[in-house]
Amino acid sequence: MAPQVEISDAVLDTARENSDTDSLVVGHMSVNKFRAIEAERERRGRRNRFFFLPDLACLIVTIPTRRHERAHLEMYDCIQDVIKDMGLADQWTHDGGATFDPPGDASGSGEGDSSGGPSSRHDPHGDAFLPTLVIEAGVSQTLSSLKTKARWWFTASNFHMKVVVLVKLLVATSAIEIEQWGAELSGPQRHCATTTRASHAAKEAVLKQQVLINWVGPLPLPQTPLNRRALSDFHVQGAPLVLRFQDLMDRPPVPAAGEHDILIPEVRLQRMAKRVW
């Protein structure tokens, strides 16, 4: 179990040195080594999140730093609050960072930061649950790495996952980049491709929307007291963030019942940024 000890020590040392370091990438990672590391982590008491990509032979270890946790939890709250306001709390299940292991080790293993989906996706005969929404955050983790995770969620779930929201914090400029990823047909739809298999094979992960939140108040932001950070000092480009109701709930909205797409307005995104920073 020596590899696990080395990884754990490296994670702890890195986190101690820099509170904004929220990820560690371990290369030359085989399936067998990953499973041994995963088992040892469970024995010690799980805390860090694992994302194993066998085609790249790498393991991304997410360190749940305070800023990292605020980022994905605030984003999740933005979405869940709208669902609750529509009176659908009983139809929505929060799945946190539960492990998703697709059939066969060749596909890897993923643990998102926050996730959720309609309660109807629960397996009535077991504990299985496949969310429609996954949120991935990054502080030191690069946006490119987060995008790799987004693509994995769609392909590994055979596109049963519908929305991935990325939240990237840029500490140097106190900015937040938000990206919404979804699935689209990769080319012109062929009417002859009528089977579910053909439909899924024709899909690809695509960037649906970008939102950028910039701090425009006095720099550096950390030197501005919390009670002097006005919402207007957080400039939002690309708002509102809009997530399709049908993508999240697996059914069309019922307008007569007050159901609609999930819309996160500028002011809510400003509040999110203020809480994160």
Image: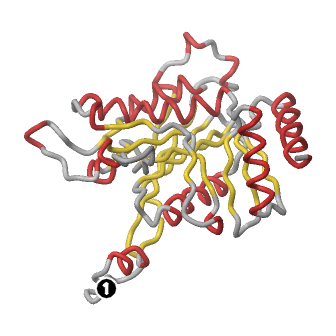
**Residue 208, percent from left and from top:** 42, 58
Question: Residue shown at 18%/40% (left/top)?
Answer: 259
Q: Quadrant of residue 70?
A: top right
Kindly state the secondary structure of the residue where label 1 is placed.
loop
**Residue 228, percent from left and from top:** 56, 12
* Left or right of 7, for residue 276: left
Residue nearer the viewer, 128 or 215: 128
**Residue 143, percent from left and from top:** 64, 52
Q: Name the residue type under label 1.
A: Ala
> How was this image coloured?
secondary structure
The residue to which callout 1 is attached is: 193
Q: Residue furthest bottom?
A: 192
Residue nearer the viewer, 197 or 147: 197
Q: Residue furthest top?
A: 227
- Numbered-mark total: 1
Q: Residues within 10 Å of mark 1 (few under 14, many from 20)?
A: few
Q: Quadrant of residue 54?
A: bottom right
* Left or right of 75, for residue 171: right
Residue nearer the viewer, 36 or 178: 36
Question: Residue shown at 55%/57% (left/top)?
Answer: 150
Q: Residue furthest left?
A: 256
Question: Residue shown at 77%/33% (left/top)?
Answer: 44
Q: Is residue 124 above or below residue 151?
A: above
* Left or right of 206, for residue 251: left
Q: Is residue 218 above or below residue 64?
A: above
> If the image is split into quadrants, where does the C terminus sit?
top right
Question: Residue shown at 33%/75% (left/top)?
Answer: 196
* Left or right of 205, for residue 198: left
**Residue 173, percent from left and from top:** 67, 36
